[in-house]
Amino acid sequence: MTDFTVGDDCFRLDGKPVRLLSGALHYFRVHEAQWEHRLAMLAAMGLNCVETYVPWNLHEPREGEVRDVGALGRFLDAAGRAGLWAIVRPGPYICAEWENGGLPVWVTGRFGRRVRTRDAEYRAVVERWFRELLPQVVQRQVSRGGPVILVQAENEYGSYGSDAVYLEWLAGLLRQCGVTVPLFTSDGPEDHMLTGGSVPGLLATANFGSGAREGFEVLRRHQPRGPLMCMEFWCGWFDHWGAEPVRRDPEQAAGALREILECGASVNIYMAHGGTNFGGWAGANRSGPHQDESFQPTVTSYDYDAPVDEYGRATEKFRLFREVLEAYAEGPLPALPPKPVGLAGPVRVELAEWAGLGDVLEALGDPETESGVPPTFEELGVDRGLVRYRVAVPGPRQAYPLGASGLRDRAVVYVDGVRAGVLTEESGTLPEPVAGPAEVELWVESLGRVNYGPRLGEPKGVTGGVLHERQYLHGVRARGLRLGAFEAADAVAAVPFGPVEAAAGAGDAGRTGLFRGTFTIEGIEGTTGASAASAASGASGASGASGASGVPGVDHAGLELPGWTRGFVWVNGFCLGRYWSVGPQRTLYVPGPVLREGANEVWVLELEDAGEPQVELGPGAPVETDAPGVVQP
């Protein structure tokens, strides 16, 4: 039986000192058929371990509806086949720039500020979830012949709270559920974070992007003995909609990595490969020194300026990191797997069919509710998607300003069927006053829930009320359209599509809606790309969520929507995520396994202003080289 332990100055495997050279790769951000290739890239970079979070909300979006927790187990099995150890961070909170920090909306909606505390009701649902999830980890621990060597208790808790009772309970729960490998915590290298987030008897680790010597010095004040480890070495950063992209100089990042290793420490590169926020699961932040100011939604790409880019390709940062890591390898590093191959040429997809948003809502929406005040998304059970609110302005009355207080996040507003404006949290009043009587519709979209800081779990929708001058308008009808409604194989069968030309004659209603088109792809015989290598080695899960089997010689494509404004795209029923003309992201990543040889189908759900009825497919974004953007220190 293999034994992995925490020693006084290092990790030990069967008593022998080992250094963990780990990289973060989230199984839920990479198509399952591509896991093998991405794990091989980590090994080729010189890593001996992979780390992943587990998003509770992905696996239990509605209470009791537990979905495919076996995906974690399959990923850990793939890591073992790749010769990598594994670090698992099951939360229940994960941050990760993921919707709501991984907490389901039914949890934050019910418990509010009681989440991540000793609250008995919150702890009860966490325990039920962990007992469902953790068998996937327990049976794959290194002592049982699996790859799992470390499991985290909570996540960066010192950045949020100080409930030692909760943390010790959670550590005990992990043990009760059968976790026997060492447990650890991870926090920023600051006194208040380490005192708030550490647990007696558990290994404390630090998260930072530079200044290893100083960071470890702070860590040693709180933990005089035990192996040093940077559990999140931030080698890049994430992007927000409407902001400049963030980049980190490869040479500077490689120097920071070298400094960590020169301290004798272990490391987890965050991210080694970022992947993609498919399905509208991207989170959001709040600006300011305490993360409680303006709203900053995260883009669909989670490239993270990582050494292995979103498309699975080696970057200059990969080459430099490999040079650093090679000096700590026990033998020659593995060769790189085949480079992923993009779609050979451009493909223009004509969107020949259209259905208005109202018709889509009738076909796929939840039942409409009526109440005195607008219900939040949480009260309606909507995690990702939008809600249509309808309310009447009594009359006759003169024109007054009309707006929404507590709006999260963005609303397209119609008065008597005519587009009247777009409202946001910062700009919540229509540009022109509204007279009564009138019928008002607000189509409100959540742009992603906050995943870090004191605003974690804040509700979405019209959280205050609809105001006419100072008067609240009561008697609100609300109906949700969840992105999850599009997941079934025959999801759009009930949508009454008509010819796309009908959109042009539908007035303002034609500016939004669900557009559908088809395109054809032919395979390239005799190719040796990453998809061919995975198929040859019998990679599992190639059909993924789309039911597709891939196209020979095509590992990925890039999809663009020039002239379109904001919404979501599906290819063969697989949701690529959100697009938005504010940038900086212009190209959505299309995993090769969701494509089909022959006929393929695209759906575009436009929520603001449609462009010409076509989308463009191509080889995807090029490998980044000295791309402009904000420099991450």
Image (cartoon, helix red, strand yellow):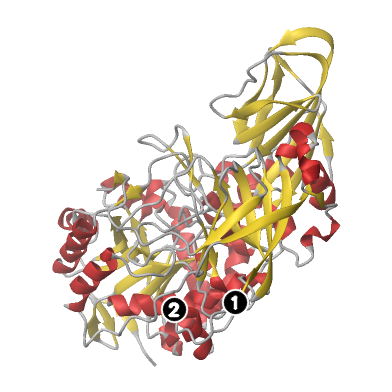
Disc 1 and disc 2: Cα gap in Å? 15 Å
Is residue 322 left or right of 160 when viewed as pictured? left
Q: Tell me the residue at 32%/45% (across/down).
A: 629
Q: Is residue 485 above or below residue 393?
A: below
Q: Nearer the viewer, residue 511 or 12?
A: 511
Is residue 158 left or right of 443 when viewed as pictured? left
Residue under pointer 2: 37
Q: Nearer the viewer, residue 167 or 83?
A: 83
Is residue 434 left or right of 559 when viewed as pictured? right
Residue under pointer 1: 550
Q: Secondary structure at mark 2?
A: helix
Q: Amino acid at mark 1?
A: Gly
Question: Can I make out residue 633 in this image?
Answer: yes
Q: Is residue 79 above or below residue 317?
A: below
Q: Secondary structure at mark 1?
A: loop
Q: Earlier in the sequence, mark 1 or mark 2?
A: 2
- Counting from the top left corner in percent of width and height, residue 65 is at 71, 64
- Counting from the top left corner in percent of width and height, residue 69 is at 60, 72
| Residue 49 badge | none
